[in-house]
Every structure is written in C-alpha cells, then in structure tokens.
Image: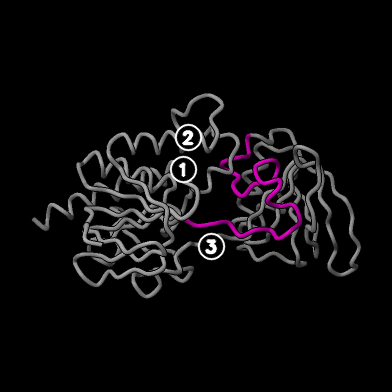
Amino acid sequence: MSKVYDCIIIGGGPAGLSAGLYAARSKMDTIIIEKEKYGGQIVTTDEVDNYPGSMENATGPILTDRMRDQAKQFGTNFLKDEITEVDFSSEIKLIKGIKDTYQAKTVIIASGASPRLGGFLKELEFRGKGVSYCATCDADFFTDLEVVVIGGGDSALTESIYLTKFASKVTIIHRRDELRAAKSIQDKAFKNPKINFIWDSVVEEAEGEAILEKIVVRNLKTKNAEEYKTDGVFVFVGYLPISEVFKGKIKMNEGNYIIGDQDMNTDVPGVFVAGDIREKSLRQVITAAADGAIAATTAERYLESLC
C-alpha cells in the first residue's frame, strides 16, 4: 500500500476510460480500477452509430477496446478489483478493495449506473438482440418496425414519444390502470396516434430464435397470458446508481446519484465524479466521455494547487 497515485479512477466504462486518457496525457500517475468488464453498459450494444467519429459497423466492445488501448498507450494503468470501502477524510484518499488497499491524491468516481431489469424470462438473453434500455441509442434500428415499451413513468412515456419518430407502432405495457408520469407528458402520449396501451399487464417472457420475435404478456387482473408479436422491447423502469460504497462519504441526491458541479467537483476536495453515477439529464457514451475529460482536467488543476 506504499504507492500513492496521482489519480485513482473507480470504474472502467467510457467515463473512466476518458478520464484515464486525459489524466495520463497530463503526466498524472493514473490507475483505473474496475471490478467487471471494461467498457460499462455499452459493451452489451451490438451497434454504435451515435458516437461522433466512430468507425463503420462499430460495436460497444470494439469502441471501448479502442478507448482502453488509447488510454493505456498514454500510460494509464489498469487493475481488476472490487472496491468495498473508501476513506476520503484526509488529503491522501484510501480506496479499499477485496485484493488490496490503494492510495491517491485525487479520485474520480465513474462507477456508473445499471438499468433496472424488466424481470421477465430470457430478458438478458435478448439484451442487444431486441431488448434495449435506451431509446436514444437504439431507436434508429427499429425504423418502420413495431416495438413495446415497459413502464409508466416520465422516462417511459418520454422515450415512447421519441420512439414514434422511428417505429411504426409503440405499445406501452403498464402493470397498473393509470400512469405515473407527469400529466403534461401523459397528454402528449395519449394524443400520439402511434402510441397504444396495454393496461394491468406485465411481460413474462421474451421469445425468438437469433433475435426477439415475440413476448408473453399476462393480464394481472384476469390472469390470462397471450403471445404478442413485436420487433423490440424497451425497458424503462428506472436506473440504479452503483453508489452503495460511497454512501455517507460524499453528497448524493435522493436517488443516490452523486452530486457534482459543471467541473465534476463533488463536495469533497480531491474527489470528482463522471458518467452515469452523477446527477445529470442525459446518460450517453458521449456525455460520459465528456464528463471523464472534464473530471481529469479538474483533478489536474487540483493537484497543481497542492504544490
């Protein structure tokens, strides 16, 4: 534990990889600690066509592999470990993992968030093959096709309205007989001729060969189950920030997202935040990468202030 890094980045998704690139290029001794696969949520995406400048037929894994290689080329170190505890009370921050304990002058939290699952059978099997959690990312793939949306809140209806720009038909399946979304959003959805509703129902299973072809929908009142043909299922039942280990150590909002300003400063000096873990309006690869670049640049300025 004797080594003290200039910067420890927790999380190896686009935000963390971008932060690693910028930090290492600034000659900061940098390490990215990731507990799972590098690349974050985007590694489950078969096609990425909304990231500026990405190569033709780019996939999530290909894009993030390039990000990692670039960060490594400039000197970023990489380590697999699961962080179990942090201590931000001193100028030198302590990061405790299952394998070891690490020290750093600055920390960038880029641990991300994970979409809540719909909870139906074969959901993960068809993730990226008809099941999606991001309309902005994947709507274009369903042009002139029919899709289903699971959810009844603001995000479900807002994303459904967005999907109507591409899909020929959008069917919202909600487990209750009334929506939770704001009245103004509901009005827009009800007035949209492409949007239909299936009430008091849940999706129980996804079916298909190589890609999704249909789902099984059960009415919670009648208990009847029916097959419903669809080209895609979009799940919008919320996100879960991966922030448990930071509770009580840093300021969060009611949803347990870490609060950061426009320069990615948190309320703890020397600790910065980037990507889906922070309170923000748009969670996309491009905004995560931008957050990482800003966080690393702000961390560099912080380090200079200590000299």
Q: CA distance from mark 3 to mark 1?
A: 17 Å
Q: Is residue 282 above or below residue 45?
A: below
State the residue position of label 1: 285
The mark nearer the N terminus, 1 or 2, is 2
Q: Which residue shows up at 28% across the image and 41% down it?
A: 22
Q: In this rendering, which labeled residue sits more in front, label 1 or label 2?
A: 2
Q: Look at label 1 and name its amino acid.
A: Val
Q: Is residue 130 magenta?
A: yes
Local secondary structure at mark 3: strand
Task: Give the camera-side residue of 17 and 263.
Answer: 17
Callout 1 environment at 10 Å: few (<14), some (14 to 19), or many (20+)?
many
Magenta range: 112-140
Q: CA distance from mark 1 to mark 2?
A: 10 Å
Q: Look at label 3 and name its amino acid.
A: Leu
Question: Which quadrant holds residue 218?
Answer: bottom right
Q: Which residue shows up at 43% across the image and 44% down it?
A: 14
Q: Is residue 59 magenta?
A: no
Q: Look at label 2 and name its amino acid.
A: Leu
Question: Which quadrant holds residue 140?
Answer: top right
Q: Which residue shows up at 73% across the image and 33% down it?
A: 144
State the residue position of label 3: 240
Residue 213 rendering spot, x and y as whole percentages: 80, 41
Callout 3 environment at 10 Å: few (<14), some (14 to 19), or many (20+)?
some
Q: Are marks 1 and 2 in contact (CB under 8 Å)?
A: yes
Task: Give the camera-side residue of 232 and 158.
Answer: 232
**Residue 63 marker:** 2
Residue 149 rendering spot, x and y as whole percentages: 70, 51
Residue that sits furthest to the bottom in the current view: 248
